[in-house]
Image (cartoon, grey):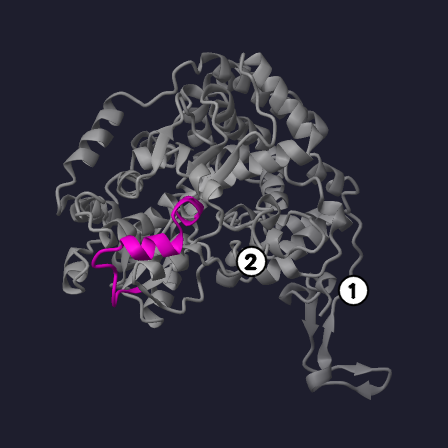
């Protein structure tokens, strides 16, 4: 990758989203700390709103497109920036979907344009902003080589299952940059998190459920199915030899944590694999303290495991 | 077995006789079970148009019944009765009564989009599942599903303040679905979270409970979104040939809830 391209991603707009202000606090904290440790500049989008998550589209899909396009518009028109980074899979997915729909669906573009005008906003033109996931941000701005150089202590010997969930890769048409050859992300076998954690020393296990669904959309409204789906993921990770499931989405992360507890309580099925954000793992590998990366803000208690592995 | 025969071999359509002689031939035993002859007359010839008029259902006509959606489906793996391919088939031929047999599980689609990823015809089956859920509810075949209640509580918060706050979300959802907050798993999660005293996180969440986070300068967006959702729901009801809702006052107050 050329120097200028990496340079472009070292200063980006930051859209944390609602979950990172609540249950995903550890992801917000560790993302900011990781950025700081790597000398990356994150500028929070001013007056941001919810992207619509997985719910607004079921009331009306164009409400979600409007909500997400508003973030892109703030990035382009208020901040004058052309890259926005969202660590949450839901936010990332919705911004990418809005970008796609506004460029390819005339009806969406017309309705969302009209709503923005009525709300007195400049509106968003597709192509103004590139949306990145936190994985793509670290991969493009830093990359494995630099990460390998900067890692102190590292994650050596830690057995990790990398879990990407649904919204990072599906449906594929909203991610035109993926599946474009060896340096691009794959929608069927994503590997960006595997690449970064391997560069930090982790021992990635062969995990078949990288893009399985945790039932996050119905985590509270149909909890029994979610518990079964999550238990399947947890057991598959343990069967693959993993001590840790690395996550890159606050909904997946809290879903795994919640249903790990719920499976214990309701089904009597206990699993021991720890659930940790990839930003927490990278932060620790770079020498940040457990509290700096918010390890104490996880429900899944990984302190003794990480200490026994010499990671902390 | 072709999928359209599925409805013919349900136990109630099968007839078995202990002793049976047909045209002088004794067919007792293995050959004594028959499928009851029946004639379907209650087709809803507008069913496909009705589903296509709802958000997500627009592309249902493209389906050529390959079954990739059901094969890829997350929920089908847990419950084989959950069969997107079969429902799409029933809608396309207008077999409304058959579709209604599964009315209580259709809402369980988890939106993982594995079907949409696998579909070679861009039917967007995930969207079709959502359209079916709306249709069932609008036509009065099912009460509001727990998932729809959640979507409404969530989107009302977003439209009102621009952002959600998870504490209120859980509280309101449990209240509207008649569940208590004292769930064993919730108490256990809180206990585990408190083990390492995450003070900054608890303070932040506590402050959000006292004063809900909101997007500044949201007033115009709020008005615009509420008006739009209102228009869309009226349009959908008219597409399905349903009367205007009478209790507009209640709908306006809630912002979203229809009926």
Tag 2: Cα neighbours inside 10 Å, few (<14), some, or many (≥20)?
A: many
Image quadrant for the N terminus of chain B?
bottom right
Q: Nearer the viewer, mark 1 or mark 2?
A: 2
Give the structural element (helix, strand or loop) at label 2: loop
Q: Is residue B69 left or right of residue B157?
A: right
Q: Mark 1, residues whose alpha carbon is within 10 Å: few (<14), some, or many (≥20)?
A: few
Magenta stretch in the rendered image: A136-159
Residue B73's disc number = 2
Horizontally, is B150 left or right of B66 in the view? left
Where A131 sits versus A247, above or below? above
Residue A149 forms part of the magenta stretch? yes
- Residue at image location 64% in from the left, 47% down from the top: B124
Q: Which residue is mark 1?
A: B37
> Taking A148 as reference, is B240 above or below it?
above
Query: Can you say which quadrant of the picture contains the C terminus of chain B?
Result: top right
Circle 1 SS class: loop
Where residue B56 sits: x, y (%)? 64, 39
Percent coordinates x, y for residue B86 in the rendering: 67, 56
- How many numbered circles are shown? 2
Q: In this image, B201 relative to A111: left or right?
A: left
As drawn, A113 above or below B169:
above
Determine the image quadrant of residue B229: top right
Q: Position of residue B88 (x, y in %)?
A: 69, 51
């Amino acid at each position: 990758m050329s120097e200028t391209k990496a340079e472009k991603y070292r200063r980006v707009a930051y859209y944390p989203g609602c979950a990172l202000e609540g249950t995903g606090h550890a992801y917000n904290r560790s993302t900011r700390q990781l950025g700081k440790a790597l000398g990356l500049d994150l500028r929070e989008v001013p007056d941001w709103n919810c992207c619509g998550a997985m719910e607004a589209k079921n009331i009306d899909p164009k409400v979600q497109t409007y909500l997400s396009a508003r973030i892109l518009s703030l990035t382009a028109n208020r901040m004058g920036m052309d890259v926005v980074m969202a660590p949450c899979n839901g936010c990332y997915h919705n911004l990418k979907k809005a970008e796609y729909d506004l460029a390819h669906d005339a009806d969406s573009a017309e309705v969302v344009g009209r709503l923005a005008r009525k709300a007195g906003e400049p509106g968003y033109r597709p192509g103004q902003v590139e949306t990145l996931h936190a994985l793509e941000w670290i991969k493009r701005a830093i990359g494995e080589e630099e990460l390998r150089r900067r890692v102190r202590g590292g994650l050596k010997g830690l057995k990790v299952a990398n879990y990407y969930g649904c919204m990072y890769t599906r449906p594929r048409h909203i991610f035109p940059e993926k599946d474009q050859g060896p340096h691009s992300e794959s929608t069927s076998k994503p590997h960006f998190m595997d690449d970064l954690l391997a560069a930090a020393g982790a021992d990635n296990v062969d995990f078949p459920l990288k893009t399985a669904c945790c039932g996050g959309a119905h985590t509270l409204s149909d909890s029994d199915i979610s518990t079964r789906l999550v238990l399947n993921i947890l057991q598959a990770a343990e069967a693959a030899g993993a001590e840790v499931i690395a996550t890159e989405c606050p909904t997946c992360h809290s879903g795994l944590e919640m249903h790990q507890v719920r499976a214990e309580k309701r089904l009597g099925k206990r699993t021991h694999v720890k659930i940790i954000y990839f930003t927490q793992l990278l932060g620790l590998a770079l020498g940040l303290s457990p509290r700096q990366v918010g390890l104490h803000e996880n429900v899944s208690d990984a302190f003794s495991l990480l200490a026994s592995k010499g990671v902390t | 077995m072709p999928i359209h025969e599925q409805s013919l071999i349900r136990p109630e359509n099968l007839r078995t006789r202990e002793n049976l002689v047909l045209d002088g031939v004794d067919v007792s035993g293995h050959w004594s079970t028959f499928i009851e002859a029946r004639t379907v007359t209650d087709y809803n010839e507008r069913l496909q148009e009705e589903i296509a008029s709802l958000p997500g259902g627009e592309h249902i006509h493209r389906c050529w019944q390959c079954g990739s959606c059901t094969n890829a489906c997350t929920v089908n793996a847990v419950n084989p009765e959950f069969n997107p391919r079969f429902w799409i088939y029933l809608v396309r031929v207008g077999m409304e009564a058959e579709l209604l047999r599964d009315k209580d599980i259709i809402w369980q689609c988890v939106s993982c989009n594995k079907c949409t990823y696998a579909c070679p015809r861009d039917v967007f089956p995930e969207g079709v599942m959502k359209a079916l859920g709306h249709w069932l509810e609008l036509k009065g075949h099912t009460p509001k599903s727990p998932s729809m209640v959640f979507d409404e509580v969530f989107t009302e918060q977003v439209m009102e303040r621009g952002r959600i706050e998870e504490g209120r979300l859980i509280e309101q959802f449990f209240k509207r679905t008649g569940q208590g907050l004292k769930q064993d798993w919730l108490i256990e999660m809180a206990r585990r979270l408190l083990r390492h005293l995450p003070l900054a996180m608890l303070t932040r969440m506590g402050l959000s409970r006292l004063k809900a986070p909101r997007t500044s300068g949201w007033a115009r967006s709020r008005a615009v979104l509420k008006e739009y959702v209102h228009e869309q729901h009226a349009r959908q009801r008219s597409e399905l040939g349903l009367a205007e809702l009478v209790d507009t006052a209640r709908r306006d107050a809630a912002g979203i809830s229809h009926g």
